[in-house]
Amino acid sequence: MWVIVIARSVAATLDHAVLPSGLVAYFNQAEWPACKATASLNNGFNLGLLLRWVGACAEIKRFSDVPATEKIHRLGSFWVNTPYSGAGSDNRAIARYLCKAERSARCVDQQQTIFSFLINGGGNSGMTPVLNLEECRQLHVWLKQDISGYLPFGCPDSVYQIMARNYPVRTACCCALCTGARANGGALRISVSARHISGSDMPTGMAYQTYLDQEIQNVQYVMEKIP
């Protein structure tokens, strides 16, 4: 999805500018401010772009309708009740936090909504070893799949249920860390989206707290699935 946000001062210069010819393959005149510079673009219409933009505006509207104090309360409620509420988490899968929340009582924009964490690789030499990027990517794939069929015979039913679930954890990312020598480690990320705050994807008739409790439970299930 292409969205162009242009400052008024920049848009004013387009009446005297010439756009690169290659932009004709990506944009129509309707997607730019009306000006002489866009005369070379197609006079077409991108219905998919319009529908995505309308959807995005609807999501923004739902988010903006939540009062600022309630946004902060909902965000705080999410993190306080997940394994990311503090460095004291006893989940052995988390080796350490890459960042901590910086909460502000006044502005939701100043609160952290994305948490990255390293995964304990299970070794015991020196500093706690963590999964590298490729290992973390593979773990990310497994978290989204039913892997209960790989469990050994005789595992408790509760373990089968955990490993059968799939979870939308954000993709693995690369970070630098020090493990005696400089190396690349892998990290996973879990974030609070605008929908978590607005509840725009809640089933009809569901109470917001019930919805939030389910999302918190999903994060807890993720941590249970990580061995």
Image (cartoon, rainbow, N blue to C red):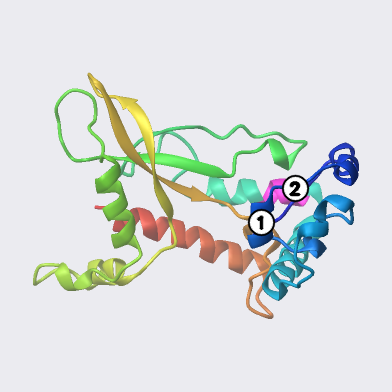
**Residue 66 shows up from this direction:** no
169 lies left or right of 38: left
**Residue type highlighted by circle 1:** Ala
Element type where label 1 sits in the image: helix
Percent x, y for residue 191? 53, 50
Residue drawn at x 36%, y 53% as measured from the top left: 223
Q: Residue 3 or 131: which is nearer the viewer?
A: 3
Disc 2 residue crowd, few under 14, some 14–19, many 20+, Cα 10 Å: some
Residue assigned mark 1: 194
The picture quadrant where one finds residue 123 is top left
Q: Secondary structure at mark 2?
A: loop
Q: Which residue is mark 2?
A: 19
- Give the x, y percent position of residue 85: 50, 41
| Magenta part of the chain | 70-74
Residue plotted at (34% across, 70% down): 165
Name the front one of labels 2 and 1.
2
Write the residue at 79% across / 47% down.
68
The answer to whether 205 appears left or right of 180 in the picture is right
Q: Residue at x 69, y 68 (%)?
A: 49
**Quadrant in the picture for residue 181:** top left
Q: Can you say whether 179 is above or below 188 in the image?
A: above
